[in-house]
């Protein structure tokens, strides 16, 4: 087997070597499905790819946090898939997941350098749903995907992030993770362990019941609309934080805002600065209830929330217009 170092820069060739010998299905409990997928890959490669596309996108997006980058990775994987010799493949899913994971790692390495010089705080581009959810977006949203969770993952290296996501979110076992990343099982266990230590303190807070999340957010929306400071403050955790991402394109806060008083004042000042012009709209952000804020009828930001023990512990405000392209621009 090729080492991870030898595979770097040869993603396509290494994936073919690894996955040709990979077991016939990623999930042993579904051998018939794996056989059907392998047969379909030969008979109709476009159909086989389309069936796997939601999973491929969900991996790439969780790795990169930017929809366009994730779509580019999936498109690149399709081009390699379309030009590959598939007769020898036992598991198309393993082959494609390997390609997407390694392409995402390479792209994230380049993005890390860019994000270090990013103006202000970098938040992931939210996947916003205002209307009915499609089957594809249901698949894309499956598992942990919240803006707060992805922001925490930014503290991991690209390899650690891939190993952590494959093991903890997509439920691959360590042997599979090792095959997909071209590393030893021992190395992958170490990477996942390090990643867990870095994110565990925050990760345990995720996964709030969605109805409770929605109910709390509805109260916050009403309070924010009316500028009731006491009502806003009552819904915030004592250690609440607010992170704003303007990307240097629009004004944002150069530091993280902490505390109920400071966060409450920000929402009240927005109303005072734009009397009669501020409107909020409920929406789903990365599969979780969130809000869109409009000022003067035009989209100003998308707001994601972290809820802990019945209170709002984090507010993540995406204002960079480059990350709001898929959101209705007017209310």
Image (spheres, rainbow, N blue to C red):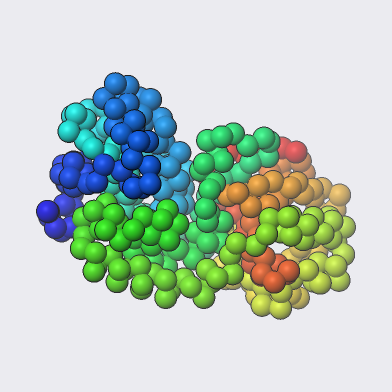
Percent x, y for residue 93?
32, 40
Of residues 141 and 19, the one nearer the viewer is 19
**Viewed as shown, does residue 262 lie left or right of 119?**
right
Tell me the quarter of the image containing the C terminus: top right
The location of residue 323, given as percent across then percent down, is 54, 46
Position of 162 compared to 136: left or right?
Answer: left
Can you see residue 213?
A: yes
Quadrant in which residue 252 is drawn = bottom right
Residue 268 vertical position relative to residue 106 in the rendered view, above or below: below
- Does residue 54 lie above or below 310 as drawn? above
Nearest to the observer: residue 62 or residue 96:
96
Q: Is residue 66 above or below residue 203?
A: above
Relative image position of residue 55 (x, y in whole percent): 43, 42
Q: Position of residue 237 (x, y in %)?
A: 71, 74
Q: Residue at x 29, y 21 (%)?
A: 43
Q: Is residue 1 above or below residue 136?
A: below
Seen at 51% across and 43% down, the residue is: 140
Q: Residue furthest top?
A: 43
Q: Can residue 77 be seen in this view?
A: no
Closer-to-camera residue (61/172): 172
Residue found 70% across the figure and 67% down from its top: 312
């Amino acid at each position: 087997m090729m080492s991870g170092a030898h595979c770097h820069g040869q993603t396509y060739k290494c994936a073919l070597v690894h996955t040709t010998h990979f077991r016939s299905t990623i999930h042993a409990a579904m051998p018939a499905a794996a056989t059907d997928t392998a047969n379909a890959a030969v008979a109709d490669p476009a159909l086989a790819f389309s069936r796997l596309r939601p999973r491929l996108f969900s991996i790439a997006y969780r790795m990169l946090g930017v929809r366009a980058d994730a779509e580019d990775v999936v498109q690149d994987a399709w081009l390699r898939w379309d030009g590959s010799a598939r007769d020898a493949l036992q598991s198309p899913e393993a082959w494609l997941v390997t390609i997407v994971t390694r392409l995402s790692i390479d792209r994230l390495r380049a993005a890390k350098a860019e994000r270090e010089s990013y103006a202000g705080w970098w938040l992931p581009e939210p996947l916003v749903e205002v209307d009915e959810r499609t089957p594809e977006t249901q698949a894309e949203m499956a598992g942990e995907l919240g803006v707060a969770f992805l922001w925490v993952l930014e503290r991991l290296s690209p390899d650690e992030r891939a190993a952590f996501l494959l093991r903890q979110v997509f439920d691959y076992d360590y042997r599979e993770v090792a095959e997909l990343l071209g590393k030893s099982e021992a190395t992958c266990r170490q990477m996942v362990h390090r990643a867990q230590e870095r994110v565990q303190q925050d990760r345990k807070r995720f996964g709030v019941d969605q109805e409770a999340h929605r109910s709390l957010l509805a109260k916050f929306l009403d309070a924010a609309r009316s500028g009731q400071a006491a009502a806003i403050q009552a819904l915030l955790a004592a250690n609440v934080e607010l992170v704003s991402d303007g990307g240097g394109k629009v004004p944002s806060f150069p530091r993280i805002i902490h505390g109920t008083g400071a966060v409450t004042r920000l929402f009240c000042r927005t109303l005072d600065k734009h009397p009669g012009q501020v409107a909020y709209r409920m929406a789903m952000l990365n599969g979780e209830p969130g809000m869109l804020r409009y000022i003067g009828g035009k989209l100003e930001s998308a707001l994601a929330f972290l809820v802990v023990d019945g209170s709002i512990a984090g507010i993540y405000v995406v204002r960079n217009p480059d990350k709001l392209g898929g959101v209705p621009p007017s209310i």
